[in-house]
């Protein structure tokens, strides 16, 4: 007979004291420790393309793109792939980008969309390497739209951000 095993809920303080192994990313969501392997090469290439594009587009603004940084909110710890901050003292990002991978796919699609909206993020971009699409959840206007490989996305939260989907998926030669 299969019996469900109850999860031990971890506090923020316990999470911060946990020993963490190299090669793994750790998040704390509703008291549950989530571990995922370090990003793949494809994931890193997409992340690099996105970061380069954001960095050049935001150069003359007060906004900056940051990556793989812990974000604390409501006793949770998130580690988005990429974020845009427009205030150097802000603790929470205005735009969050997640690149789907097999180990985080369901968490990014189901849990984080709700959590980032609760957090007050203006936009949540979900980049899907499997089908080469980007879904943008615009929490300010309460919309979600998916873009394909030949589309260009213009952020409503920050119109200076314009991303050609094809560019995200360009591989290094």
Image (cartoon, rainbow, N blue to C red):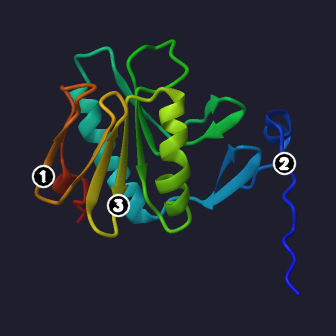
Can you see residue 23? no
Tell me the residue that label 1 is attached to.
151
In 3D space, how far apart are the residues under numbered discs 3 and 2 (Cα atoms)?
30 Å
Question: Residue 43 is drawn in which quadrant?
Answer: bottom left
Residue at screen point 88% across, 87% down: 1
Residue 37, how many percent across, how many down? 60, 62
Where, by quadrant of the figure, is residue 85 drawn? top left
Quadrant of the image occupied by residue 73: top right
Q: Let me know if residue 28 appears in the view.
A: yes
Secondary structure of the residue carrying numbered label 2: loop
Q: From the image, tell me which residue sits under label 3.
A: 128
Q: Residue at x 80, y 41 (%)?
A: 15
Q: Is residue 45 left or right of residue 117?
A: left
Mark 3 surroundings: few (<14), some (14-19) or many (≥20) residues within 10 A:
some
Where is residue 113 shown, x and y percent of the image?
A: 47, 45
Q: Which residue is mark 2?
A: 9
Badge 1 crowding class, 10 Å Cα cut-off, few under 14, some 14 to 19, many 20 or more, is some
- Which x, y percent locates residue 57? 21, 29
- Tell me: 64 left or right of 77: left
Secondary structure beneath disc 3? strand
């Amino acid at each position: 007979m299969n019996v469900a095993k109850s999860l031990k809920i971890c506090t923020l303080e316990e999470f911060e004291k946990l020993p963490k192994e190299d090669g793994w990313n750790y998040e704390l969501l509703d008291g549950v420790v989530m571990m995922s392997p370090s990003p793949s090469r494809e994931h890193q290439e997409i992340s690099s393309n996105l970061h380069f594009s954001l960095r050049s587009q935001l150069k003359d603004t007060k906004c900056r793109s940051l990556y793989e940084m812990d974000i604390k909110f409501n006793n949770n710890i998130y580690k988005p792939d990429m974020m845009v901050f427009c205030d150097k003292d802000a603790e929470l990002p205005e735009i969050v980008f997640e690149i789907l991978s097999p180990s985080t796919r369901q968490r990014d699609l189901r849990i984080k969309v709700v959590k980032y909206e609760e957090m007050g993020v203006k936009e949540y971009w979900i980049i899907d390497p499997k089908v080469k699409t980007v879904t943008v959840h615009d929490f300010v206007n309460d919309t979600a739209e998916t873009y394909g490989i030949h589309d260009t996305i213009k952020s409503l939260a920050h119109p200076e951000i314009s991303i050609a989907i094809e560019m995200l998926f360009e591989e290094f030669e």
